[in-house]
């Protein structure tokens, strides 16, 4: 068998080597003010172009050109896609009880660890469990949707069409419990997405 030799690799960097920029700045960039003027030129171009296009649209001209717009939320809003991940809700069975079986898969899959579940057993059905407590800390939640994907019985969804709001002034106010999540499913079935959205944004609209 051929002899194997061990080659010691020299470290390319050491703690004593000073850090160097990947790109060396030119003299023009180091003058600072030319770059500030350049940024203002870009901003000014966008501003005057959008203003001109909007004026032309008002006059019935340049319909093919598109300009940036500002959505006046909450009085106006851009349409949300069907895949929009909004506030959570717990789905219900036909008899009105919660669909969740307290399997803890959603809490396990949650990267933010914002779901807390306390499991219990039905007195007449010891095989199936249900959540005595089901809480979501919306301050920690990153709305990634992993809980929805992990659930094997379609018990948790994020299709309410509403996004997080200011629920209070303490951390406890932002923890949504089982009753809140179940009630959201009832309201969604009763009012639909648009009706539920209008109810949620009503406090944010100023008279």
Image (cartoon, rainbow, N blue to C red):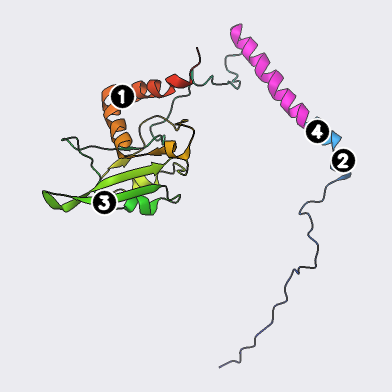
Q: Position of residue 93 (x, y in %)?
A: 19, 38
Q: Marks 4 and 3: which is nearer the front?
A: 3
- Circles 1 and 2: CB distance less than 8 Å? no
Under tag 4, what secondary structure?
Answer: helix
| Disc 2 secondary structure class | helix
Which label's residue is closer to the chain start, 1 or 2? 2
The label on residue 28 is 2
Q: Residue furthest left?
A: 124
Q: Position of residue 40 (x, y in %)?
A: 77, 28
Q: Which mark is residue 119?
A: 3
**Residue at the disc numbered 4:** 36
Q: Which one is closest to the eye, mark 3 or mark 1?
A: 3
- SS at circle 3: strand
**Label 3, residues with CA under 10 Å away: few <14, some 14-19, many ≥20:** some
Q: Which residues are magenta?
A: 39-61
Mark number displayed over residue 192: 1
Q: Is residue 165 left or right of residue 117?
A: right
């Amino acid at each position: 068998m051929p002899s194997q030799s061990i080659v010691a690799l020299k470290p390319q960097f050491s703690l004593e080597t000073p850090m160097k920029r990947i790109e060396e700045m030119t003299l023009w960039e180091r003058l600072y003010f030319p770059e500030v003027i350049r940024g203002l030129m870009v901003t000014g171009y966008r501003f005057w172009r959008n203003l001109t296009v909007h004026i032309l649209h008002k006059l019935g001209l340049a319909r093919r050109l598109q300009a940036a717009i500002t959505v006046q939320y909450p009085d106006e809003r851009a349409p949300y896609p069907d895949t929009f991940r909004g506030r959570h809700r717990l789905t219900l069975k036909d008899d009105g009880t919660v669909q969740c079986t307290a399997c803890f898969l959603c809490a396990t899959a949650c990267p933010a660890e914002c779901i807390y579940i306390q499991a219990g057993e039905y007195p007449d059905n010891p095989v199936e469990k249900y959540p005595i407590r089901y809480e979501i800390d919306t301050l920690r939640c990153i709305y990634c949707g992993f809980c929805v994907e992990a659930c094997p019985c379609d018990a948790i969804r994020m299709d309410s069409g509403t996004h997080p709001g200011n629920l209070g002034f303490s951390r406890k106010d932002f923890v949504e419990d089982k009753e809140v999540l179940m009630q959201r499913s009832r309201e969604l079935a009763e009012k639909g997405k648009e009706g539920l959205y209008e109810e949620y944004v009503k406090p944010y609209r100023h008279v």
